[in-house]
Image (cartoon, rainbow, N blue to C red):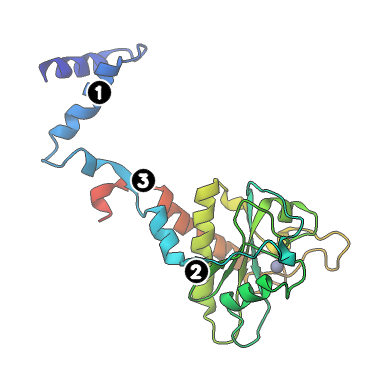
Amino acid sequence: MAVAASLLVAGCSGTGSGKLSGQDSQAVRVTPNRTYQNVSVAARALVPLKLPTSLLAEVRVHKDYLPRSARGRRGQSSMRPRYITIHSTQNWSRGADSWRHSLALKGSKLGSLSWHYTVDENVAVQHLPTNITGRHADLNGPGNKYSIGIEMCEHRGNSRTRTVDRTAKLAAYLMYKYDIPLSKVVPHYHWPRHGMSPAHKNCPHFLLDNGRPGRKWRGFQAKVKRYHDQITIQGPAYASR
Ligand SMILES: [Zn+2]
């Protein structure tokens, strides 16, 4: 300990120009922790306020992939996700929840359309692995080539608040997993659909103002950011328990 203490002093009083040897840096790092109110070194480590896996568990993702024979899986290519695209189903039919959409996709009832997740008040059903493309945004554009598509249910009786909240958690987790910035979590509106009218779809309509991103979209972004902060901002482990 005497040797470690002297090295520590030498380090603090130096000009900072010299790089510490491995032995020196260990003394600097370990000595103060061992003398800190009997709290172990491990317990003082910095950790996220919430574990990413805990946030993901709250989303309640169920994998129910489209079979390779489904129309929605034809002609797909591999993908490294760079964006997350948020939609709403505009399907107000009774019982049109995540599982019902999964059934429709698996049975090729929605033509060649496909996306990665459908979210409702209870669960998020995953239809495609996130490393292959879906067809949900902009025909042959970057929205389809590089984004994970998330649909929010809006059938009667489904809580919109809980659905949006679950979607925000899922988006935050996927941002973390693929290192996607908040600016690349976008509404379907973001992607122009060349040759279609209107080119910018009013989707997800209940998170847009007069068909465009505004106050409501910023509110959604703030919610996603709060969840992302929970799993990325580091704090002392003993403060979060
Ligand atoms: Zn859409």
> Which comes before the other along the chain, label 3 or label 2?
2
Q: Quadrant of residue 67?
A: bottom right
Q: Which residue is mark 1?
A: 26
Bin the neighbour count of mark 2 within 10 Å (Cα to Cα): few under 14, some 14-19, many 20 and up: many
Q: CA distance from mark 3 to mark 1?
A: 22 Å
Q: Is residue 15 above or below residue 232?
A: above
- Percent across and percent down for residue 147 are 66, 54
* Quadrant (top left/top right/bottom left/bottom right) for the C terminus: bottom left
- Percent across and percent down for residue 163 are 53, 73
Q: Nearer the viewer, mark 3 or mark 1?
A: 1
Q: Element under label 1?
A: helix
Left or right: where does residue 65 sit relative to residue 37?
Answer: right
Q: Which residue is mark 2?
A: 165
Rendered residue at 50%/50% (across/down)? 176
- Percent across and percent down for residue 86 are 63, 64
Question: Residue most toward the front?
Answer: 69
Rendered residue at 18%/34% (across/down)? 33
Near-viewer residue (118 or 197): 118
Tell me the kind of residue under disc 3: Gln
Tell me the kind of residue under disc 1: Gln
> Which comes before the other along the chain, label 2 or label 1?
1
